[in-house]
Amino acid sequence: VVVVSNDLLGAVTLNLALDITYDVDALTVGASHRVRTVRQRAGGKGVNVARVAHELGYDVLALGFVGGMTGELIAADLFDAGLTALLTPVAGESRRSVAVVDTGAGDATVFNEPGPVVDADEWRAFCDRVPWGRLGVLACSGSLPPGLPADAYAELTARARHHGVPAVIDAGGAALVASAKAGALVRANAAELREALAAADGTAGRVDGDGRPEPAGERAQVDVAAGARRLIELGATGAVITDGAAGMVAVTAKGAWRALPVERVRGNPTGAGDACTAVVAAAVAGGNEDWPDVLRSAVAASAAAVLTPVAGDIEVEAYRRWRPRVVVQAV
Amino acid sequence: VVVVSNDLLGAVTLNLALDITYDVDALTVGASHRVRTVRQRAGGKGVNVARVAHELGYDVLALGFVGGMTGELIAADLFDAGLTALLTPVAGESRRSVAVVDTGAGDATVFNEPGPVVDADEWRAFCDRVPWGRLGVLACSGSLPPGLPADAYAELTARARHHGVPAVIDAGGAALVASAKAGALVRANAAELREALAAADGTAGRVDGDGRPEPAGERAQVDVAAGARRLIELGATGAVITDGAAGMVAVTAKGAWRALPVERVRGNPTGAGDACTAVVAAAVAGGNEDWPDVLRSAVAASAAAVLTPVAGDIEVEAYRRWRPRVVVQAV
C-alpha cells in the first residue's frame, strides 16, 4: 500500500548550500593545513527544518534552487537523508560553505560562498512548481539568494494563501514585516524582531524622554510579546519568537503565551531555531491550535537540537523526555 | 587536415586536485567570512606542467586519477583549458584544496583534503592505459596519493623505457632516488636533492672532522652539481636541479651546466619548478640534447612563471624576451 500524503510539510530553502566541514589539528593563518576529515551535507535553514520534521516523523518536501555540480551534491545528499525534494535548476553554481574546525581549540572558522544569482525566470519557475494541492503548510527559512525580489517571502505567502495553504516564514529584517503583512505565521528571534520593527516604524535608535537609550534588560522582557502583537496587528496569523534563555513567545489573534526553557542545555545552538520552526510548521499543517501544546514541543525540540553537534539534528529521546516538562504561561 | 601527433608530452599528476581559491577581506580565526570571489581549477604539479607546455605550443596529454563530482570538475576544467586528458576513474572522491587569500594582508591559508585511496586495480588500470606509442616523453610530477606503491614513479619509468619512451620525474625523497635508479631524467630542487641523497647514503646530519655541521653556504655551491652527478651514477639519464637564486644545474653523462637567473623577479614562485619541468620534458620529447639551449628555455620559463599570480601560467612575452639572455656555464 502506497500512502500518498496530501499534507506534506513544504520546507523552502531559497539559499541552499553545500556545508563542508574540515577538521584540522590547529588553524594557523598563512600556513598550509592537512585536512584530517572532510564531512559535507546539504545545508541552509530550510534544510534543517526539513531534517528535524522528518526525524519527528512528518512527511516533508524540501524545496529550493540548485545549480551545477554543487547543486547535484546537494540533491544527492537530500536523497541520501531520505528527504523528498523538488528542486528548481538555476544556471549558476550552488554555493558552498566551508567550516574549518580547529580540533584543538574547538572553534570553527567559516567561509560562505556568495551563491548563484537567481533570475526572474528561475524565480517564476520555482513559484509555478510548488505543488500547493499536496501541501499542509509552506515553511520558508533563511536568507534570499542574490537576484530575488526583496518581497519574495511575501509573494510566496500570498500565493500560499491563494491556494488555502498556511505559510510559516522564518526571516529577519524587511522580509519579516512584509511576510506578516502578507498574512504569514512568522518566526524570528527576539533580536530580529526588535530590529525589524524598529526599522519598519522608524524607531531605530529611539531613546526615552531624557535622551538616554532605554534600558535593554527591562525592555527585553516587555517588548517580545508586544512586538509579536505588533506583527499580528500588521496582518500576521501568528508570531513565534525565540528569546534565548527567556524561552519562546507565541502570539495569535486569540492569545499570547510564553514557554520557559526546560533546563540549561550546553552544546551547539545553531539549528535550535530551525527545530522550533519545524515543530510550529508541523502543528500548523496538522491544524493544531493548542498553542501551549505547540510551544511545549517547540521548546523541547530546540533544546534537543542544541544537544547534537550538527544543525538539522535533534536528540529525539531528549525531545520526548522534555516535552511534558515545559512550563507555558499566558502573557 | 587533422594532424595526429605521435610525440605527445604525457604529463602525469597521480594526485590531481581541484584548487579552490577564496578571496576574503580579512581572515579572522573563529569568525564567519563572506567570500568575495571564488576561483577553481584543476591543480597539481603535473597539471602545471601540462598547462605551461600547452601554452608554449606543445601537444600535451594530461594523465591522472579522478573520482566523484570533484573528479568531474577536474576533468571539465582540463577540457576547458584545451588540454587533452586521459583520466583513470577511482572509486574515491578526488581531493580539493582550498586556499583562502586575505586580500588585505595578501597571504594565503591553505586546506588540503587527504584525497582518495588508489587501490592496486586502479593503479594497474592507470598503467595499462598509458598510450606509449603516442608519447614522446612521460613527465610525472608531485606527491603520490595514498594507496599507491612507494616505487610508483620507478615503475612508470621502467614501463616507459620498455616502450622506448623517456621519463622525466619531478619528485623528492625516496621516489627521486628510485626514479634515478630506474633510468629517469630526474627533476628536483636543491633542498629535495640534498635530503634525498642524505637519506639514501645514510649521511643525514653528517658533520665534518671537528664535530661541527658543514657550513651550508659553501657546501650549497658545491653539492648541487655533485649531487646531480651522484644521481647519474645511480642510473639517471639526466638530472635538472633548480637552485633558487643560484639558477639551475643540468647534468647528463656528457657534461654539466649551470644557468644563472636572468634578473630578480618578484611574484608567485609556486609553479616555477613545474615550468622548468615542462620545458625539459618538451626538449626530451623533441630529442633536443643541446643542454645550454634547454637550460636557457627552462630558466626563462621559470622566471616567466613567477610573474603570473597562478601556478601553471607563464608570461609568454617575458619568456621570449628572457630566453636569449640567460647565461649558461659548463661546471
Image: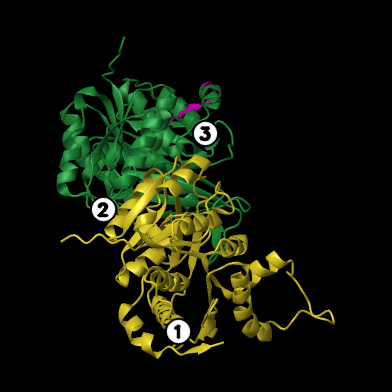
Chain colours: A green, B yellow
Residue A25 highlighted magenta (yes or no): no
Q: Is residue B22 visible?
A: no
Residue B82 shown left or right of residue A161 in the figure? right
Q: Which mark is residue A146?
A: 2
Residue B58: % across, % down: 31, 68
Q: Residue at x 38, y 79 (%)?
A: B304
Q: Are there few (<14), some (14-19), or many (20+) residues within 10 Å of tag 1?
A: some
Residue B165 visible in this rendered orientation of the protein? yes
Going by the numbered disc 1, the residue's amino acid type is: Pro
Q: Please report whichever mark, 3 or 2, sits nearer to the chain's N-terminal start.
A: 2
CA distance for labels 3 and 1: 73 Å
Placement of B251 over or under A204, stated as above or below: below
Under mark 2, the amino acid is Pro
Seen in the image, is B85 located left or right of residue A178?
Answer: right
Residue that badge 3 annotates: A303
- Label 3 lies in what chain? A
Q: Which residues are magenta?
A: A324-330
- The circle drawn on residue A33 is none
**Callout 3 and callout 1 share a chain:** no
Q: CA distance from mark 2 to mark 1?
A: 56 Å
Specify the quadrant that holds the C terminus of chain B: bottom right
Instruction: Output the chain of dot 2.
Output: A
Identified by mark 3, the residue type is Ala
**Is residue A14 positioned above or below A214 on the image?**
above
